[in-house]
């Protein structure tokens, strides 16, 4: 198998985005634009991937490295914006000594499929030349470089501004995506001159140089797949296509999406068959949803796992949480990072957890905060319970054993332990450990004054009130 590397052009400023942020860092379904072509190259087995950066180079490199911490990335800097050929040439040092094929991709083309690139590599093999390219056919090709052929063979690409009227009538367009033999690439780039209407080093000139050495392989792709992003309108349009593509794949795999148009599922999210996802749900990268899970409207699940048969009622938010089988969560619950729930746990409306481990069958159904807590199996936690885990300096642990009953409006002041089977009366502030099987109560004695209301009315009447 021929060795493969990739160059991904990420240097552009993106003036039409009207933003202080580099174009390739604008998000589409939770990831920056450039993440998608970078991932496609890695999926194909590229042993070295070179993002060419320029505008906001440090920010782009930082974000890309965070997204692909283990990937074989080497960044190259294009110091001046002198055209696409110059951008690719900036990667030469990073690929010094590499012998094989170089994929050339664009950081603002997020919809390109792995299958299309695999077909491009196959076309390169079949043609036997030094270069293969992706083309697309457009009814209105205005603005695109035209692919010129003689006897069916590609001879060159001519840009719109340099094309004759006859050439502008050609509808087959260059998508700018290439597979190129490395040895040819660096030699050819050195020969390219800025002899064109824009005075730039055109990468498209590679095609003519390659055609002189042998057949140029081609793959025709859908125009939507090869479309770039130049402004916020196009950003939203590409996101909509990607959203639909991902959602369709999940539905074909047995997932029910009640309203695909308002369901946002990022790439790499796993959803098991027979699960149901309601309108307005967002599932982000790192999330794994089991089989037979029901996710109600408006839920947000971020980098979390939800095991088989669980129910997320409407508008619940999960962040880096682990939900066991047959849990019932929400509505309006918030599970923050470090939450780990065993099976058959119930957390109800306006319950918040953070770094909380909750055992099998335990329940907290109303208006409760459980932070920095270890809670055993079969516990019942009443409405308004709070683990007071932060003293202004340190955070401390609250531990409940199995079968603990916590009455409503209880404050558990950490560090504190409540033993197996213990009861805590409603309205109690627990500041000391409660032994197993004990009852803890701390509240002011109730005072009842019979006839107090009538006496008050009498006093008011006497004063003429």
Image (spheres, grey):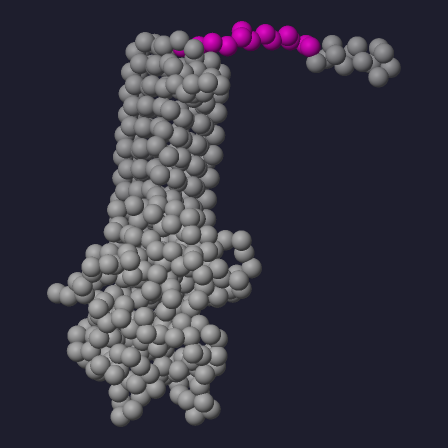
Residue in view at x 22 percent, y 75 percent: 130
Is residue 78 visible in the rendered image? The answer is yes
Residue 441, position as x, y percentages in the image: 44, 10
Residue 198, position as x, y percentages in the image: 48, 75
Residue 343, position as x, y percentages in the image: 27, 35
- Does 12 lie within the magenta span? no
Q: Is residue 426 above or below residue 353?
A: above
Residue in view at x 47 percent, y 13 percent: 429
Is residue 26 visible in the rendered image? The answer is no
Tell which residue pokes out farthest to the left in this image: 1
Identify the magenta region. Answer: 440-452
**Horizontal arrangement in the rendering, residue 289 relative to residue 11 (left or right):** left
Q: Nearer the viewer, residue 293 or 53?
A: 53
- Does 442 lie within the magenta span? yes
Residue in view at x 37 percent, y 69 percent: 85
User: Which of the 4 quarters of the picture holds residue 195?
Assistant: bottom left
Quadrant the C terminus occupies? top right
Tell which residue pokes out farthest to the right in this image: 464
Q: Nearer the viewer, residue 234 or 144?
A: 144
Main structural element of the magenta stretch: helix, strand or loop? loop
Quadrant the N terminus occupies? bottom left
Q: How many marks?
A: 0
Q: Is residue 187 above or below residue 39?
A: below
Residue 209, position as x, y percentages in the image: 29, 79
């Amino acid at each position: 198998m021929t060795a493969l590397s990739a160059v991904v052009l990420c240097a552009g400023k993106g003036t039409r985005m009207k933003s202080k942020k580099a174009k390739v860092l604008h998000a589409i379904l939770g990831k920056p634009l450039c993440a998608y072509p970078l991932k496609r190259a890695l999926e194909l087995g590229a042993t070295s991937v070179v993002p060419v950066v320029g505008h906001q180079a440090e920010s782009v490199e930082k974000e890309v490295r965070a997204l692909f911490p283990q990937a074989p990335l080497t960044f190259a800097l294009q110091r001046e914006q002198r055209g696409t050929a110059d951008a690719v040439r900036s990667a030469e040092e990073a690929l010094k000594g590499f012998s094989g094929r170089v994929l050339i991709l664009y950081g603002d083309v997020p919809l390109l499929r792995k299958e299309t690139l695999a077909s491009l590599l196959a076309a390169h093999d079949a043609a036997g030349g030094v270069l293969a390219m992706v083309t697309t056919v457009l009814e209105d090709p205005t603005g695109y470089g035209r692919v010129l052929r003689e006897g069916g063979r590609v001879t060159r690409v001519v840009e719109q501004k340099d094309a004759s009227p006859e050439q502008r009538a050609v509808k087959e367009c260059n998508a700018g995506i290439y597979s190129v033999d490395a040895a040819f690439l660096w030699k050819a780039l050195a020969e390219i001159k800025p002899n064109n209407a824009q005075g730039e080093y055109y990468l498209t000139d590679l095609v003519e140089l390659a055609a002189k050495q042998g057949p140029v392989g081609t793959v025709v792709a859908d125009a939507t797949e090869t479309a770039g992003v130049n402004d916020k309108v196009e950003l939203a349009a590409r996101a909509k296509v990607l959203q639909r593509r991902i959602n369709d794949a999940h539905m074909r795999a047995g997932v029910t999406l009640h309203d695909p148009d308002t369901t946002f599922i990022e790439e790499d999210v796993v959803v098991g068959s027979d699960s149901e996802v309601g309108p307005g749900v967002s599932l982000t990268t790192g999330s794994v949803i089991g089989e037979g899970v029901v996710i109600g409207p408006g839920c947000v699940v971020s980098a979390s796992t939800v095991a088989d048969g669980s129910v997320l009622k409407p508008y619940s938010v999960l962040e880096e949480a682990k939900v066991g089988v047959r849990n019932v969560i929400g509505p309006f619950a918030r599970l923050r990072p470090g939450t780990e729930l065993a099976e058959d746990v119930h957390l109800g409306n306006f319950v918040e957890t953070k770094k909380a481990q909750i055992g099998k069958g335990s329940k907290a159904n109303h208006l409760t905060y459980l932070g920095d807590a270890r809670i055993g199996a079969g516990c019942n936690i009443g409405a308004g319970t709070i683990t007071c885990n932060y003293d202004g300096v340190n955070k401390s642990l609250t531990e409940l054993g199995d079968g603990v009953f916590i009455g409503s409006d209880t404050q558990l002041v950490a560090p504190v332990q409540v033993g197996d089977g213990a009861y805590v009366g409603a309205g109690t502030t627990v500041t000391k450990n409660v032994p197993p099987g004990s009852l803890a109560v701390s509240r002011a004695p109730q005072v009842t004054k019979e006839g107090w209301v009538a006496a008050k009315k009498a006093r008011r009447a006497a004063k003429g009130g």
